[in-house]
Amino acid sequence: MRRSLISGLVVALLSSAVVISTAHADDKLIRVGFNPGPYKEQFQNGVAPFLIKKGYKVEYKDFSDGIQVNDAVARGNIEANIMQHPVYLKSVNERLGIDNVGIVQVPTPPMGLYAGKLNTLDTPKPGTVISVPNQAPNEYRALLVLQSLGWVKLKADIDPATFSQKAISENPYKIVLKEMDNAQQVRALPDVDFGLIQGNFAVSSGMKLSSALKLETPTSQFINVVTVAGKNKDAQFAKDIVEGYHSAEFKSYITSHSQYDGYLQPSYFK
């Protein structure tokens, strides 16, 4: 009986050691989620090497939309995602009833107006068809571009997270705004006169920002952020991710690669 008791204690101690070891190993695992765009490449080449030197293991997860990748962060299935700006993040938090937060800005390709059937910015004819994202915050961004051209006018005090076309106060050229999934917009360009396309979907499809007829005016609310669950905003892994983006190595990577020319740059780049 004494031998059985001792054996039981040994097994218990070994089991505890395994649990502690596993927990410690999990603390050094960072799973990061992405939508299509340049953010995975930026992270892999500019930030992951910094984290690996600190002893982290990094895993990459690809998602098809912004809802799934935010839900995964909130549930703890991944530690972070890199694919959205604060306005979109706020709208998803409200939709899902979650508390994800942004911890650091990342270089972001701006939204642009791209040629479809038409390739000049002449005064639009009545019925001109322009594709726009079917997500409220990004449709709002698209309309800001049209407003900057003088093609539409928006009402004051709009909440971008709940934007709808009812917020358009003037549409003198009777422009038709065709809402569609932003991942489909590049392929749909031949079917519309113009497309207002998010930068990440444009560049991931091989389009150059310089080919846009008009780019959005830089604004911090539309610079994308690394997102974590609210409860993890002060976790060590989150602090280390921020440090990685602020590192000289990351800045050097971005500034030495021409494909990032024209991106909206984080405040820490200035």
Image (tube, helix red, strand yellow):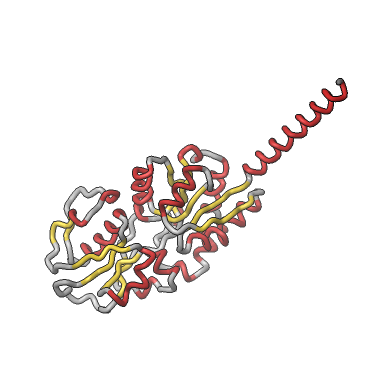
Give the total of numbered labels.
0
Judging depth in this view, the residue of 205 and 220 nearest the camera is 205
Judging depth in this view, the residue of 1 and 143 nearest the camera is 1
Residue with the most extreme front position: 1
Up-down: is 86 above or below 128? above
Residue with the most extreme right position: 3
Q: Is residue 69 left or right of residue 213?
A: right
Q: Is residue 24 left or right of residue 260?
A: right
The x and y percentages for residue 269 are 45, 56
Q: Residue at x 39, y 69 (%)?
A: 202
Q: Residue at x 29, y 49 (%)?
A: 161
Which quarter shows the N terminus? top right
Which quarter shows the C terminus? bottom left
Judging depth in this view, the residue of 154 and 192 nearest the camera is 192
The x and y percentages for residue 223 are 39, 55
Q: Residue at x 22, y 71 (%)?
A: 129
Indicate the quadrant where residue 173 lies.
Answer: bottom left
The x and y percentages for residue 102 are 43, 46
Q: Is residue 33 left or right of residue 187?
A: right
Up-down: is 232 above or below 120? above
Q: Residue at x 36, y 53 (%)?
A: 220
The x and y percentages for residue 266 are 43, 55
